[in-house]
Image: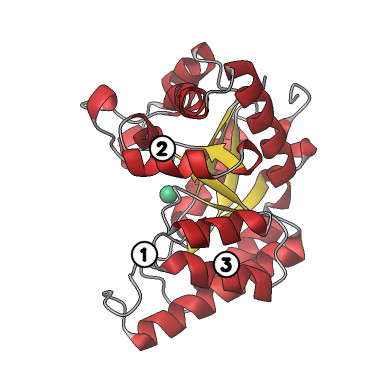
């Protein structure tokens, strides 16, 4: 059954020189693929190169991370990367809105307006290229990101490492978008509550590596193999047999990325 890490920063310096070993470990744990996400034109380039080097397991998403500073011209540069490498690109991401809680966040009104402008442009790019959007829009940013997805007519999107109020989560899932969970599910009640509250048909798994996790994962570099543990945790939290969970997650992958992305072994 196909199992992917749907969000990992394989461009990060923590993984330099380690990709072959990391992929071998992932395979040992039954992981068939990884969506490597980019954050700016340089990391997008690195991500595209990895997808070219490891076509059996790595697919690339290209984006403009909302918490990174981007010079003028970043959006056209992203558009050029999508056009120039379209066969390698499976999603637009990581894109989104900077972290803030409405009313008291660190983002000024002007910063918010600029961030929304960049996200709108990225979503238009996704819509034109018929690609899903991988969103960073936690907490107070989630509801606004949902509005922008609807406004731009985006059919396929995932709120990565999702964190938001139950009402906003239900609106996201009700609109047909996905939410994804990380190894935090193994030790954080907030994540367990999220998994209990949404149907299996709305869930994906990811690591957001190399972001470090605690408890069972403490002192280890975060790697894609860890999503195997996340899937087991979903089965435990929902009280659903593991094969059923894996089948649902595989179907979700197909719905988000399309069958072509999964390759001939995708099932
Ligand atoms: Zn990320």
Can residue 192 be seen in this snapshot?
A: yes
> On the image, which quarter does residue 16 sit in?
top left
For disc 2, the neighbor class at 10 Å (few under 14, some 14 to 19, many from 20) is some
Residue 118 location in percent, x, y?
52, 75
Along the polypeptide, which appears first: circle 3 or circle 1? 1
Is ligand 1 closer than 8 angstroms to the Cβ of mark 1? no
Where is mark 3, residue-wise?
146
Along the polypeptide, which appears first: circle 2 or circle 3? 3
Can residue 133 be seen in this snapshot?
A: no
Name which residue lies at 48% across and 46% down: 46
181 relative position to 17: left or right: right
200 relative position to 39: left or right: right
Q: CA distance from mark 2 to mark 3?
A: 22 Å
Say above or below: 255 vs 262.
below
From the image, which quarter does the N terminus lie in? top right
Q: Nearer the viewer, residue 119 or 147?
A: 147
Where is mark 2, residue-wise?
192
Say above or below: 75 vs 126.
below
Q: Which mark is residue 224?
A: none
Where is mark 1, residue-wise?
67
Query: In front of the other: label 2 or label 3?
Result: 2
For disc 1, the neighbor class at 10 Å (few under 14, some 14 to 19, many from 20) is some
Query: In front of the other: label 1 or label 2?
Result: 2
From the image, which quarter does the C terminus lie in? top right
């Amino acid at each position: 059954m196909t199992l992917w890490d749907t969000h990992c920063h394989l461009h990060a310096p923590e993984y330099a020189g380690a990709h072959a070993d990391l992929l071998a470990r992932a395979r040992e744990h039954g992981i068939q693929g990884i969506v490597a996400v980019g954050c700016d034109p340089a990391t997008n380039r690195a991500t595209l190169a990895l997808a070219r080097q490891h076509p059996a397991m790595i697919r690339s998403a290209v984006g403009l991370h909302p918490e990174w500073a981007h010079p003028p011209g970043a959006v056209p540069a992203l558009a050029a990367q999508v056009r120039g490498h379209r066969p390698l690109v499976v999603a637009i991401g990581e894109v989104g809105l900077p972290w803030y809680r409405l009313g008291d966040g660190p983002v000024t009104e002007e910063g918010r307006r600029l961030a929304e402008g960049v996200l709108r442009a990225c979503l238009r790019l996704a819509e034109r290229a018929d690609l899903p959007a991988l969103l960073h829009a936690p907490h107070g940013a989630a509801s606004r990101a949902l509005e922008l997805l609807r406004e731009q007519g985006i059919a396929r999107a995932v709120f990565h490492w999702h964190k938001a109020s139950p009402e906003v989560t239900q609106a996201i899932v009700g609109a047909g978008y996905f939410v994804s969970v990380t190894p935090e599910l193994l030790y954080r009640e907030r994540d367990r509550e999220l998994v209990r509250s949404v149907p299996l048909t709305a869930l994906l798994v990811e690591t957001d590596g190399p972001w470090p996790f605690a408890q069972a994962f403490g002192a280890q570099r975060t790697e894609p193999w860890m999503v195997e543990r996340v899937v087991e945790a979903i089965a435990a939290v929902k009280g659903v047999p593991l094969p059923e969970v894996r089948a649902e997650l595989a179907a979700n992958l197909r719905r988000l990325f399309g069958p072509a992305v999964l390759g001939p072994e995708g099932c």
